[in-house]
Amino acid sequence: MAVLAINRMLLGESLRSLGWQGFAASAMITVASWGIGWFPRNQLSPLARSGFFIEFRTDASGVITCIILMALGMVWLTRTWIVTRPRVQGATGVTHKELGRLLGMWAAPLMFSFPILSRDVYSYLAQGRMLHAGKSPYAEGISALPGWFDGGSDGLWAQSPSPYGPFFLVLARIIFFVSNGIPEIGVGLLRVVAMLGVIGCFHFTAKLANKMGQNPTWANWAIVGNPLFLLTMIGGVHNDALMIAGVFCAMAYAYDRRPVASTLALSIAISVKPIVLLVLPFLGLIVLGKNPSKRARWSMWAKVLVLTLIWLSIVGALTNLWFGWLPAMFSAGSAAFPYAPVGLIGWSVSNLAGILGGGIGFVNGLVVAAFQALALIIVARLALSKDISNPVRLAAWSLSAVVLLAPIIQPWYILWLMALFVISHRVSWSSEKLMIYVSSLILVAVFVDQLSIEQWHSAWMMRSFAGVLAVLLFAGLFRFDAKTRRILAGPAGPAGSSHQGKMP
C-alpha cells in the first residue's frame, strides 16, 4: 500500500507533458550542437560556408550560450527520464506503444543536430570512402587517402584498421557514394540508420525481456530511454544500436530454439561490430536450455559455429571483404586510448622500455596481447561454467571482461554492458540508482571531452566552464529537485518481473 501511495504521488506529470518536456530538452541540445557539435569541414559542405552557423562558432558569446543550452538540455532530459520511472513499474503504468511514442518525441529533434558526444560518424564516412576507392579499411588507416583530416575524422583512426564489420563498411560505402561526398547528406543518412538501430533495440528489448520474464516496459525505459543512449546513438550517430539490436534479436530467437535464425541475427551484429562474436558460445547455451551435458554443449557449440561461419562467409562473399575483420579485431593496440586501464599500462610499460632501449611498439603489443589472452580465458571459463541458468548474464560478464581489458574503451561501450545486465535479470533498486548516476557522470565527461571548440577560442577555458556548469546542474537536480529526490529515495524496483535478482 505504501508503494502504491508513493506511486500516486509521483505520477503527477502527464505523459503528454513528459513527452513535450523531453522534446524541448532535445531541441535545446540540437540548437546547442550548431555551435559546439562536430562541424563538417569538407570543402563540399554547404554548411561550412554558411554565415548563420559560423556565427554560432566564431563568437565567444555564441559558444558560451550553446554550452549553457546543451548542459541545461542534458539535465532536463535526464530529469524527464527519471520522472518517467514510476510509470514503468507495472502493468498499470505506461504501455509499450505509449512508451514508444514518448521516446520518439524525445529523440525527434536530435535528427537535426550536428554530431555530438563523438565524431566517429565522420570516420564511418572516411572508411566508406576508402572502400569506394578500392582500398581495404582492414589493411590501412583512413590516412591512406588525402583529405581525411578535413573530413572531420578523429586522428586516432588515421593509421589504425577499422573496428567495424563488413556489412556496416559496405553500408558506409553506399552512403558515401549516394551522398557524393557531401558530409551533411552522409551524416543524415547514417543517422537514419542509427535511428533504425534504436527502433530495433526498442522492439527486441521488449521481445527478449518477455522471453526472460522481465518487465519489457521497464527494460526499454532503462536501456533505450536512457539519455546517454539516445544522445550517443542518435545525437552521436553511432552504429552500436544496430549491434545491440542484432544481439538481442539473436538471443530472443535462441530462446525460441531457432538456431538458424539466431545465428543469422548474430552474424549481422558481428558484421557491424565483430566484438560480439564472443556472444556465440552463450547463444548455444540459450538454445540448449538448463543443465546440458558436456557432450551436448560441445555438439551445440559446433552447430552454432558452423551456422555462423556459413552466414559470415555469405556476408564476406557479398561484400568481398571476407574475414579481414578477424586480424583487425585484435590489432587495435595501435589506437590504444590512454584512459583505458590497459591502454595506460601499455603506454607506461612501453615508454619505460623505450627509455631502457627496448622497442616501444613491440612491448606495447606484448602488453595488449597479454590482456587480450586474459580476457579470452575469462570468456572460456564463463562458457564452461557449471551454472548456466542465465546465459545472458554470463555473456554480460564476458563482454565486460573483454571491454575492460581492451586497450581502448569508449564511454558508449558501457551502454552494451548496461543493456546486457539490465535485460539479464531484475536489478536491485540500489543498482538501478547506480545506473542513473553512472549514466549521468559519463554524460558529463563525454560532453566536456567532445566539445568542438574552434581554434580561436581557449579550449581549456570553455571545457572547464562546461564541466563546472554540468556538474553543478546535475548536482542541483539530484539534491534540490523535489520530485527527482522522491523518486530516487523510493523503495521500488521494476515490478512485473517473474523472478528476483540483484546486479552483482
Image: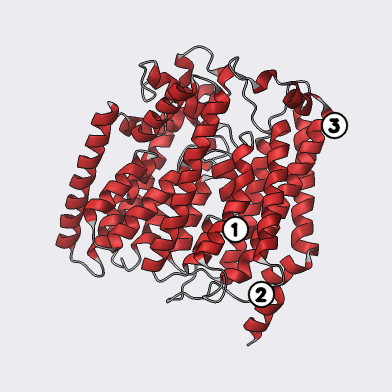
Residue most extreme to the bottom: 1
Residue 399 against residue 287 in the figure, above or below:
above
The label on residue 490 is 2
Real-space Cα separation, disc 1 to disc 3, in angstroms: 34 Å
Q: Nearer the viewer, mark 3 or mark 2?
A: 3
Side of 315 where 492 appears, left or right: right
Side of 425 where 12 appears, left or right: right
Find residue 488 and report its image quarter.
Answer: bottom right
Q: Nearer the viewer, residue 481 or 371?
A: 481
Side of 139 where 55 appears, left or right: right
Q: Nearer the viewer, residue 398 or 107?
A: 107
> Which element carries disc 1, helix, strand or loop?
helix
At 62% from the left and 52% from the top, the residue drawn is 106
Circle 2 packing at 10 Å, graded few (<14), some (14-19), many (20+), is some
Q: Nearer the viewer, residue 342 or 219?
A: 219
- Residue annotated with mark 1: 102
Q: Is residue 359 visible?
A: no
Of labels 1 and 3, earlier in sequence is: 3
Residue 345 against residue 414 in the figure, above or below:
above
The label on residue 61 is 3
Amino acid at the residue labelled 1:
Leu
Residue 212 against residue 109 in the figure, above or below:
below
Real-space Cα separation, disc 2 to disc 1, in angstroms: 23 Å
Of labels 2 and 1, earlier in sequence is: 1
Q: Give how far across and how far down residue 48 sits, in percent.
A: 66, 20
